[in-house]
Amino acid sequence: MELARLPISASQRGSSSPQATLLSLPLSLSFNPYLKISDNEALEILRVVSQGSRLDKPDGSHAIVNGAQTAWDMLHEEESLKCITTSCVDLDDILGGGIKCKEVTEIGGVPGIGKTQLGIQLAVNVQIPVNYGGLGGKAIYIDTEGSFMLERALQIAEACIEDMSGNSDFLQKDFQSCQVKAQPKDFLQNIFYFRVCSYTEQIAMINYLDKFISEHKDVNVVIIDSVTFHFRQDFDDLALRTRLLSGMALKLMKLAKKFSLAVVLLNQVTTKHTEGSFQLTLALGDSWSHSCTNRVILYWNGDERYAYIDKSPSLRSASAPYSVTGKGIRTATSKCKRIKIM
Amino acid sequence: MGSLKSLECEYPIIDSDFQNFCASHGIFSVEDILIHDLYMLVAFAEQQSTSERLKQGITQILSIIDGQHQPWLNGMELLEDAQQNKQVLSTGCEGIDMLLQGGLCVGHLTELVGPSSSGKTQICLKVASGVATRYMGGVVFIDTGNSFSPYALHISSIRSQILSLKSQILCHSVFDIFAMLDVVHQLEYSLRSQVQTGADQVRLLIVDSISSLITPILGGSGSHGRALMISAGFLLKKLAHEHNLAVVVTNHMVGGEGGILKPALGESWKSIPHVRLLLSRDPGSSICHMSILKHSYMASGRAARFMI
């Protein structure tokens, strides 16, 4: 097995050529004066190497590859996965029930279309108890622009609780068991808020999330608002930017898969000049557009706000209207009485 | 390939005496022997007292080196191999099959390139379910974007064969290039060691998408990123040829000169896949446009339109 295959940095590989094998790796790494690594690093390298050589052979049984799942198992799992509702019926419809867990969803739109509102709404909706069809989980909100408004979150939480108690009366559930004891303050307590001020902080934050979520296992959604802000200005080295962004995207995918949570990325738009016309596209370029599982674009259609599914492996391309009210994101009430054929 | 010291346990003829002799000529590993003048070495060995043992040691090392390369094949053997083992797998989509004159070639690495939302993952899912149904073969799907959706498979397969279909498609999520290399090595090991016949034989390996694994390491200082990319490409091609699989990878596009999109991963990657297919889709419609950028035996530039 070649050293080049192992995730050891080039400087630590020292003077050995990339084709050097496990056997020629000097056992007393820390005593080698050419390598200049500490004892801890030497132990870490040996641990990675011995793990790697064990991984070459899949452990026993008939599994061809360790850790793989058959599609049948995944189908069962997928049916039991819940979605986070957006409180707008049309939007939930085109999303197949809501924002799905285990996937990274990117939501982009022009300023003022309601991206932050949608983010706050999702942070509140994820906490809806399981009895009412929600996930009963907590939310992580990473704010890069400083657009999280506490008063608005309180307002949305209050409206959500009102709706829940309204629904319970309607469904005539057993009052004792489903009595809504939640206060808006409890909702706010379950939102973990982080403010990041530069791109290095953002990357460090995402690296730290793994440890944080292992300690707080009931987190069900991570919202990053917005993911592009720190990467758009003053970034001289575009190649570095591409590398950092694709590395960040992979880490977020890994988080979503490992902890079965939904990751929601809010993005800004930019103009692209193609064939003589200017088109609005999401920021960060073409390589970033491949870093999400689903993409939703929010846009204005006349006076109404619409959402459009731009990219999804399992959902059809469709548009749906929604509105931003005092209570948060709600279903758009169409002003005309005629039935619109889309 | 290792120093001479490490070969001592397996081949006792390479004892310390031999190692000292080689060390006196600056030879410490098998690679050093490859670049050394062997006639000179043998002449020096003759002058030593233990010349017979030394010459046996040299012959032993030469036979180890000989065992490292693939056996020579002549044209007839290659033709037999191609006719018996390297069939063409139908993709399940008529438009693509007509364009590729039958479908995916076993033993070839096929790359699907296209801008975002052009249908690459859809085609991969369709091909996976097509191969699992039609050929009752195993499919390994390496997914980097959590986009493997059994629900989408469900739609595009024939209902009555769903049960058998689902157990043959294995999906593995990887999030960095080292994990992908581990998975491919494990697959190679199990294909080599286990005899698989009939229903269980793995026929198709899909990596969706390989560009998202390589982009974080490509570029920057040092060329180990590019080295990893090329060795990953070679590993996939070797797997395809030796174990009679078809391998499909997907790639995305980046902006080039003049704003025209070009495939990502650069010039070094261009020569690695055997077949490169360019996909595009008109926004809002479900009609895909596919053209051949590169093929082993067909003219490039051929195109087709079909519906997904």
Image (spheres, coloured by chain):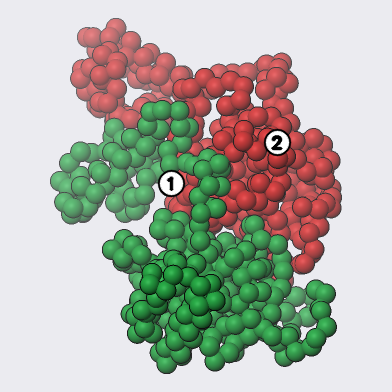
Of the residues under marks 1 and 2, which one precedes in the sequence? 2
Q: Nearer the viewer, mark 1 or mark 2?
A: 2
- In the drawing, what numbered circle is on residue A59? none
- Mark 1 falls within which chain? B
Asked which quadrant contains residue A270, the reply is bottom right
Is residue A11 shown left or right of residue B147?
A: left
Front residue of this view, candidates B287 and B230:
B287
Q: Which residue is mark 1?
A: B179
Res. B168 visible in picture: yes
Residue type of the residue flagged with mark 1: Ala
Front residue of this view, candidates A77 and B285:
A77
Residue B157 appears at what percent x and percent y?
70, 42
Q: Which residue is mark 2?
A: B160
A96 vs A63: above or below: below
Identify the residue at the far top of this view: B52
The chain in red? B
Q: Are marks 1 and 2 on the same chain?
A: yes
